[in-house]
Image (spheres, helix red, strand yellow):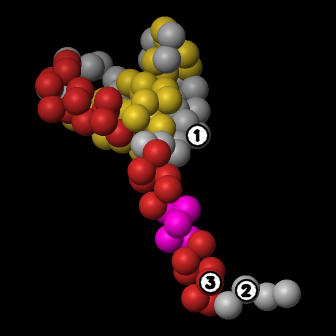
Amino acid sequence: MQASPSRLALIFLALFLGDACLGSTGACVGAGGVLISPVCKADWSQSECRAWQDQGVDGARWTFHSGDSCVHLGYTQKCSEGSYRLPGAC
């Protein structure tokens, strides 16, 4: 049985809105300011990342990557609990 295009569109819309309403987690990457190299915070919500951006933490620019992990973004070296950097940057 094949789903109609309108049914597929409704399913996609429901999944998208459900994810947005549930507040998915992702990676929050900070770069610039006093940071010598970018840092990635794992399993953060968009609101947590936005708060660091709004507060100007470390003078860095903080960017949220919904659904991504730090490792997926290339930040594979764990420097402290929940913080990752590019290899050799800790």
What is the span of residues highlighted in magenta in the rendered image? 12-16
Between discs 2 and 1, the one toward the N terminus: 2
Query: Disc 3 versus disc 1: distance between alpha carbons?
Result: 32 Å
| Residue 62 is one of the magenta-drawn residues | no
Kind of residue indicated by mark 3: Arg
Q: Which residue is mark 3?
A: 7
Whether residues under marks 2 and 3 lie with C-beta atoms below 8 angstroms apart, the answer is yes
Q: Position of residue 46 (x, y in %)?
A: 35, 39
**Label 2: which residue?**
3
> What's under tag 1, amino acid-wise?
His
Q: Secondary structure at mark 3?
A: helix
Task: Say which element carries label 2.
Answer: loop
Q: Secondary structure at mark 1?
A: loop
- Indicate the position of residue 33 as horizontal and vertical percent values: 18, 24
Whether residue 2 is visible: yes
Which marked residue is nearer to the observer: mark 3 or mark 1? 3
Determine whether 20 is above or below 5 in the image. above
| Nearer-the-camera pick, 46 or 53 | 46
Quarter of the picture holding the N terminus: bottom right
Q: Residues within 10 Å of mark 1 (few under 14, many from 20)?
A: few
Point 42% across, 50% down: residue = 21
Crowd rating for badge 2 (residues with CA inside 10 Å; few <14, some 14–19, many 20+): few
Q: Main secondary structure of the magenta part?
A: helix
> Which residue shows up at 51% across the image and 10% down it?
81
Seen in the image, is 72 located left or right of residue 65? right
